[in-house]
Amino acid sequence: MIDIAANEKTTAADAGHGISFSEAFRVWLRVALLSFGGPAGQIAMMHRILVDEKNWISESRFLHALNYCMLLPGPEAQQLATYTGWLLHRTAGGIMAGGLFILPGIIAIMGLSYVYAAFGHVGVVEALFFGLKAAVLAIVIQAVVRVGSRALRNRVMIALAGVAFIAIFFFNVPFPLIVIAAGVIGYLGARRGWPEFAALPHGGKNAAVADSLAAGEQLPDHVRPSVPRALIVAAVWLPLWLVPVGALLIAFGEANVFSQIALFFSKMAMVTFGGAYAVLAYVAQQAVNHYHWLSPREMLDGLGMAETTPGPLIMVLQFVGFMAAYRDPGTLSPMLAGTLGGLLATWVTFTPCFLWIFVGAPFIETLRGNKALAGALGAITAAVVGVILNLSIWFALHTVFQETSPVRSLGLSFDRPVLSSVDFPALALALAAAVAVFRFDMGMLTVLAGSCVAGVSLRLAGLI
């Protein structure tokens, strides 16, 4: 049994003692194949396997690792896997755990992207995705309620969420600016000691145990902060991330679709605080409205793919990259261009995740208990509720209504629904999915499967 937090004399070798690399590989592959259900379900599944079943890491250390990953940009579940693998087997363990976590999703989304590009307009396929859209809308609304119930604990946090929603929905304010502004407000409020920005324990009944650990406790050697080691790690991972981006810009220029994919998703990797749904709001805003890589309905279809496959929810970004390059292949065949575009989006999205863990986690370790930083995170989470609400309304407009009308005046920039264009079958399916989620508490995969069956049934009946 390994309890990293409890044994003050644990070293890096001791942490991995008794766990062979091959055994770890099998467990991380199992984690990857079971990683359905978004970050909440993935984190719960990892806790069950790593803490309760395998006893590879203590409860307190697991919760601390989760808190570190919540402070970083990127998908927290994948970073938690990377962190834990790194803690047990150093860098090789982190690469194995984090890489395996996304591998099934890469394969599944790529396969579905091929099917979508080749057969997306075939009746049965269209009906399947018609059903998926309705279920995805209900699931995103559920995310608003779930995150809001935790984050909006006072009037100040509610106000932050409201301002964030108004800014992004009505004025098209970029998501990174909203994150930065909320973080500054939370940081300053916590520094001043305002109770509205006080941190709440994270992690349930055992969070108090985790928070009681001293910041200076003995850690494995490779987890202790070291500036020289951090510089060496950065010298490896920064080029892995940025050299392909620079090479594309030099070879093809900024107007090329591959250069745009590399730049956009690299920028996104640095500002993706607040979870997958907040990220998707930013991607939808840019990929659909700015770059015109795909339509709102196709964005919904991609999210439906990510919801039904293992891996991080933001694997939908691979679908976005695929469709962007598929439609602007240049001299390549559309399928080859799409494949390269999807893999490029995945590379520049997830490579920074390994960089943040391998370079930043030891230093973030020293910041736990920092009230100002916790206040900033709390304010960002509150603002993210408004961003996710924007995403749910955006999805609803393009699921339930067949047409929207742009409003562009007096600084406003949003789409309003054309009421006469209501898609009644889509509305009925969305309401049914919402009842299944909220009234009967059905699981996500059950709702998604049921919605797909309903979509095909409506098609066979000639109603869509």
Image (cartoon, grey):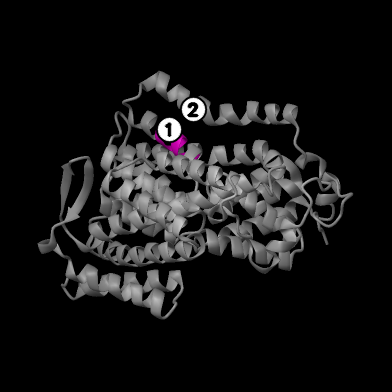
Write the residue at 22% across / 63% down: 400
Relative to residue 315, is residue 54 depicted above or below? below
Give the residue type at disc 2: Pro
Could you classify mark 1 by the number of other residues whose Cα lies within 10 Å: few (under 14), some (14-19), or many (20 or more)?
Answer: many
Q: Classify the position of the C terminus by image quarter.
A: bottom left
Q: Is residue 215 magenta?
A: no
Residue named by callout 1: 262
Instruction: Give the spatial CA distance, label 2 vs label 1.
Output: 8 Å
The quarter of the rendered structure image containing the N terminus is: bottom right
- Left or right position of 8 against 85: right
Q: Does residue 279 appear in the picture of this structure? A: yes
Q: Main secondary structure of the magenta part?
A: helix
x, y percentage for residue 107?
Answer: 48, 51
Q: Residue lying at the far top in this picture: please name it.
A: 250
Count every numbered label the image shows and give the total: 2
Q: What residue is at 74 percent from the left and 47 percent from the top?
A: 87
The magenta stretch is 263-269
Q: Which disc, if any, is residue 244?
A: 2
